[in-house]
Amino acid sequence: MKKLLLSLGVGVVALAFYGSAMAADGANIYATKCSPCHGKDAKGSVMAPQLAGGEFLKKSDDATIKQAVSEGRSGAAKKYPNFPLAMPAWKASLAAADIDAVVAYLKGLK
């Protein structure tokens, strides 16, 4: 019984660490890939709209956010015409797990 409880405890700690590591990876990826346009604090800039506390994150499910990050937004899909650049597609340069980590990080922003 002690071995079972110990194993379960180790599993819970491992999952908690994995979740923290994934969130940290999302923050790091955001800092290197997204913040040049959306700002270090995700409050937007003259280049791209606000993410933290913004309507897009509030009203979108994970799949919609993932699609925007993966596919980008240009042409008719570009939602914010007052910003000069289109949202680049990151699917060619980020693994699916990295995009998932960014989505998780973004969903945690206030």
Image: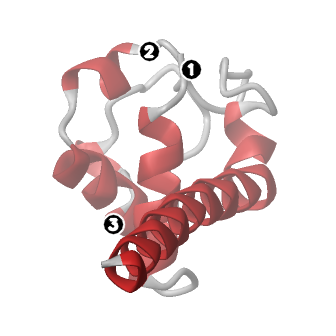
The N terminus lies in which quarter of the figure? bottom left
Residue type pointed to by label 2: Gly
Between disc 1 and disc 3, whose residue precedes? Answer: 1
Vertical arrangement, residue 86 with respect to residue 1, above or below: above
State which mark lies toward you, 3 or 2.
Answer: 2
Real-space Cα separation, disc 3 to disc 2, in angstroms: 20 Å
**Residue type, numbered disc 3:** Glu
Q: Position of residue 15 (x, y in %)?
A: 45, 67
Percent x, y of residue 17: 60, 64
Using the image as rendered, state which of residue 3 and residue 71 is in the foreground.
3
Looking at the image, which residue is at 35% across and 27% down? 57
**Rounded to the nearest whole Å, what is the CA distance between mark 1 and mark 2?**
6 Å
Indicate the colouring scheme. Answer: secondary structure
Viewer can see residue 89:
no
Disc 1 packing (10 Å; few <14; some 14–19; many ≥20)? some
Q: Position of residue 9 (x, y in %)?
A: 46, 66
Q: Which mark is residue 71?
A: 3
Which sits earlier in the primary sequence, circle 3 or circle 2?
2
**Residues packed near mark 3 inside 10 Å, few (<14), some (14 to 19) or many (20 plus):** some
Identify the amino acid type marked 1.
Answer: Gln
> Could you say where residue 62 lies in the image, as x and y percent from the top left?
24, 47
- Give the left or right position of residue 109, taking residue 12 as reference: right
- Secondary structure category for the residue under label 3: helix
> What residue would you read off at disc 2?
54
**Contact, CB < 8 Å: mark 1 with mark 2?**
yes
Residue 50, which numbered label?
1
Q: Nearer the viewer, residue 65 or 27?
A: 27
